[in-house]
Image: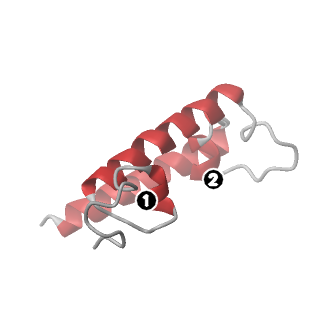
Amino acid sequence: MSELAEGDPRHGTQNGYGNHKCRCDACREANRIKHGEYMTRIRESGELAELPNVVHGTSYRYDVGCRCDPCREAHNAKSRATKARLRERNK
């Protein structure tokens, strides 16, 4: 599954995951950590949640920090759909 050669020093980096399409456990974990840090910064700054002319009522908008009723409901609807899909798959 990995696009990088074994032993490549870029394994375990966000660069390996994003630019080289490597999906080894180390690259996936590095990307998960970096993306989590990015989302924390975005939520704390409010820069994406408070942009003018944004479309509300999306799960993405909720993920970046908006807590208006339409965004909250979109997020909840997506969560319910995901849970239902997982229940069906695990039957």
- Dot 1: what SS? helix
Q: Quadrant of residue 44?
A: top right
Q: How far across and down, in percent of the image, does residue 42 sit? A: 64, 35
* Relative vertical location of residue 3 with respect to residue 86 in this rendering, above or below: below
- Residue of label 2: 58
The residue at the point 64 percent across, 38 percent down is 69
Q: Secondary structure at mark 2?
A: loop
Whichever of callouts 1 and 2 sits on the residue coming sooner in the sequence is: 1
Q: Is any part of residue 67 visible from this angle?
A: no
Left or right, residue 87 beside residue 64:
left
Q: Amino acid at mark 2?
A: Thr
Q: Is residue 88 visible?
A: yes
Which residue is most to the left?
91
- Give the left or right position of residue 87, taking residue 81 as reference: left
What x and y, as percent, mark residue 57?
66, 51
Looking at numbered disc 1 in the image, what kind of residue is underneath it?
A: Gly
- Residue drawn at 55 percent across, 31 percent down: 40
Query: Position of 13 compared to 75: left or right?
Result: left
Residue linked to disc 1: 16
